[in-house]
Image (cartoon, helix red, strand yellow):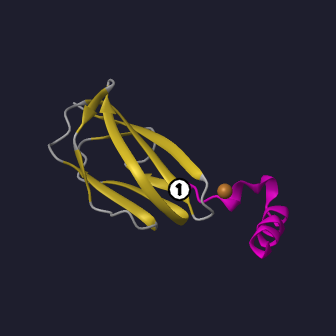
Amino acid sequence: MLKNILTGMILAMTPLGVAAHSSSEATTPADGATVAEVSELSMRFDAPMRIISVTLTASGRDVEIERATGMDPTNEFRAMPVDNLAPGSYQFDWRGMAADGHPMQGSFSFTVSE
Ligand SMILES: [Cu+2]
């Protein structure tokens, strides 16, 4: 009961309740960026996020990546491509759980130049 009251107070103080969820503040590569090469994929959150699953796809095909971040909630998630990324368009999708237990998801895209 106490927990519910506190949650209501926090939501009431937060415009639209949006900031009650941790959200992705910045990514590497940046969303929409064109880069020459990718050595690391990362996302920073304004509150700890448990990242449950991540996928990297190029034109809908899965590209293998290796997580550097485990399953504990974190403000910074990191992963690396297993092989050098060929030129093309990539999309990174993630699913996670915010500190308040709500399921979250998001994505960002980038292009690797020729
Ligand atoms: Cu929430």
Report x, y in % for residue 60: 33, 25
Q: Residue furthest top?
A: 59
Which sits in the foreground, 112 or 107? Answer: 107
Report x, y in % for residue 79: 29, 55
15 with respect to 96 (left or right): right
Identify the residue shown where x is 58% and y is 65%. Answer: 99
Say which quarter of the image contains residue 88.
top left
26 with respect to 59 (left or right): right
Say which quarter of the image contains residue 19.
bottom right
Which residue corresponds to mark 1?
97
Instruction: Tell me the quadrant of the picture where the C terminus can be found.
Output: top left
Which sits in the foreground, 40 or 65? Answer: 65
Instruction: Tell me the quadrant of the picture where the N terminus can be found.
Output: bottom right
Image vertical order of residue 8 relative to residue 56, above or below: below
Residue 104 is a magenta residue: no
Which sits in the foreground, 38 or 6? Answer: 6
Write the start and end of the magenta stretch as one range. 1-24
Instruction: Decide: few, some or many residues near mark 1? Use Cα within 10 Å; few <14, some 14-19, many ≥20.
Output: some
